[in-house]
Amino acid sequence: MVDAPRTMQAQDMTHDPVLVIGGTGKTGRRVTARLEAADIPVRVASRSGTTHFDWLDETTWDAALTGVTAAYLVPLDGANRTGALIRRAEELGVPRLVLLSARGVDTPGYFGADNLAGEGHLAGEAALRDSDTDWTILRPGWFAQNFSAEPFLTPIRQGELRLPAADGAATFIDVEDIAEVAVTALTAADDAHTGATYELSGPRPLTIAEALAEIAAATGHQARYVPIPVEDFIADLVAQGAPAAEAEIWAAGLTPIRENFEARVSDGVHRALGREPRDFTDYVAAAAAAGALWGSGPR
């Protein structure tokens, strides 16, 4: 059971729900679970959910945004629609918005020369800062949970993970930490998180090979890391059925690991929650216990 946020325990409960856009994704479903565990009304909006929401269809937005006390926004990759949604949320009187962005979006070259993964996030952040809402921005680095989800999971299970990350390292952030920061900001009884930008990371850098070694130590399943060129990685994903545009976004996202930009430890978890972030070892142990399906091998 997830503990109720201390901020919500101290404030009067409201019957107005918290909106989660992106409620089926890595962060959104964990934000939803924490809100539900704390008996906080939650409205999950998606293309297939009870509350129909489509980033590309503005006629679906009002039903999601009307009558909510706060909203968690996970932008749609490759579509710069965040600013328009924020402006509509403000028009409909949504008082508090928490936006999922990404670490490094304001650093030139962080995601490569084309900055495919950063421009949309920056535009969304700018729109949020220009709004009159109580806003909070989350800028996480690379998710630890990418190792227990696609497109990493199947190659790891098959014993070989091919990535254009060279020997770079990253301070992988446990998505549970992102969700806890988000819920804390969404439900705070005061304005402690209003106007805050939290850059979120794990407590120490690991290379891809070191991350796979952690998985092997916990499960006995061995997978080796093979550094490859960016073009080969994109071709691999396309051959597996991924759209070329999505493959290019993944490739751009790996640039900061390859260039060691992601090796930096950030203090956002401590600033928001007053504790240190979860370690990658703890993530692996929890994922293995939950049946991450990495497989098993001789210990």
Image (cartoon, rainbow, N blue to C red):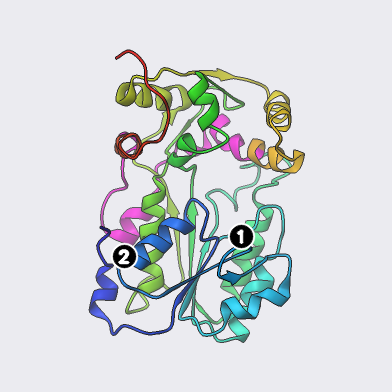
The mark lying in front, picked from 2 and 1, is 2
Range covered by the magenta-colored residues: 252-281
The rendered magenta stretch, by its main secondary structure, is classed as helix
Q: Please report the residue visible at 67 percent of the width from the left and 42 percent of the height from the top.
A: 249
Whether 269 is among the magenta residues is: yes
Give the residue drawn at x 71%, y 23%.
232
Locate the N terminus and report the quarter of the image it occupies: bottom left
Q: Amino acid at mark 1?
A: Pro
Question: Mark 2 Cα within 10 Å, few/some/many (few <14, many 20+)?
Answer: some
Which residue is at 24% across, 69% downward? 6
Location of residue 8 (image quadrant): bottom left
Q: Is residue 61 above or below residue 267?
A: below
Q: Which residue has dot 2 on it?
A: 37
What mark, if any, has residue 116 been given in the picture? none
- Type of amino acid under label 2: Ala
- Residue 211, image x, y percentages: 41, 27
Instruction: Name the residue carrying label 1.
Output: 75
